[in-house]
Amino acid sequence: MARIHGFPPISRADARILILGSMPSRESLARRQYYAHPRNTFWPIVSALLDLDEPGYAQRVSRVQARGVAIWDVLQDCFRRGSLDSDIDDRTLVPNDFGPFFREHPAIRRVFFNGAKAESVYLKKVLPGLTGEAAELPRLRLPSTSPAHAALTLEEKTAAWRVILEDLT
């Protein structure tokens, strides 16, 4: 089992929502891109909701930032055997430092979690250390876009994720 390290956030100071995953998959780490696994539905969902038709990663990143979306992971690093959230060794969790992040992004209105693991780690490891407005931000767990979460169709996931648009208008 190896210690793995996440990425810096995709964000601009004027971001209005924050979408948090748990930790990049092996494929994402290898490509140095958020949600790089070809069967992960994150980019198809976000592209459909935000009317993105950019084919390249850099172009998609630029467009989501321009739309007020920040993307990050709850974990800075951890030990994980495979790519699944269930493979993460909970004894090794090191969360990202959200205090400075929220101070640098004062326009964030809501935090969304891409799945249950991101939400549970945030609630246990991050929220207790937050103060002021950052601690009071509304939060909502969305269905995971991971290929391991196949209980919902792409259409059902997209419908559930539509809620992110409420804070972007």
Image: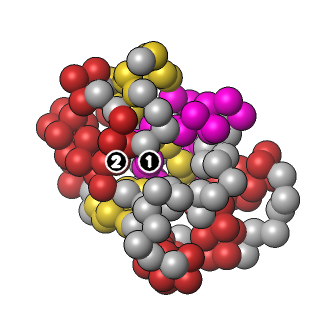
Q: Quadrant of the C terminus?
A: bottom right
Helix, strand or loop status at disc 1: strand
Q: Quadrant of residue 163?
A: bottom left
> Label 2 belongs to which residue?
118
Which residue is more in the foreground, 45 or 1?
Answer: 1
- Which residue shows up at 49% across the image and 38% down it? 83
Q: Magenta segment, which residues?
A: 6-31
How far separated are the C-alphas under marks 2 and 1?
A: 5 Å
Query: Which callout, 2 or 1, points at the residue further toward the start of the chain?
Result: 1
Q: Position of residue 161 (x, y in %)?
A: 47, 73
Q: Is residue 51 left or right of residue 23?
A: right
Which residue is more in the foreground, 57 or 98?
Answer: 57
> Label 1 belongs to which residue?
21
Q: Can I make out residue 63 in this image? A: yes
Helix, strand or loop status at disc 2: helix
Residue type, numbered disc 1? Gly
Residue type, numbered disc 2? Ala
- Which residue shows up at 31% across the image and 65% down it? 140
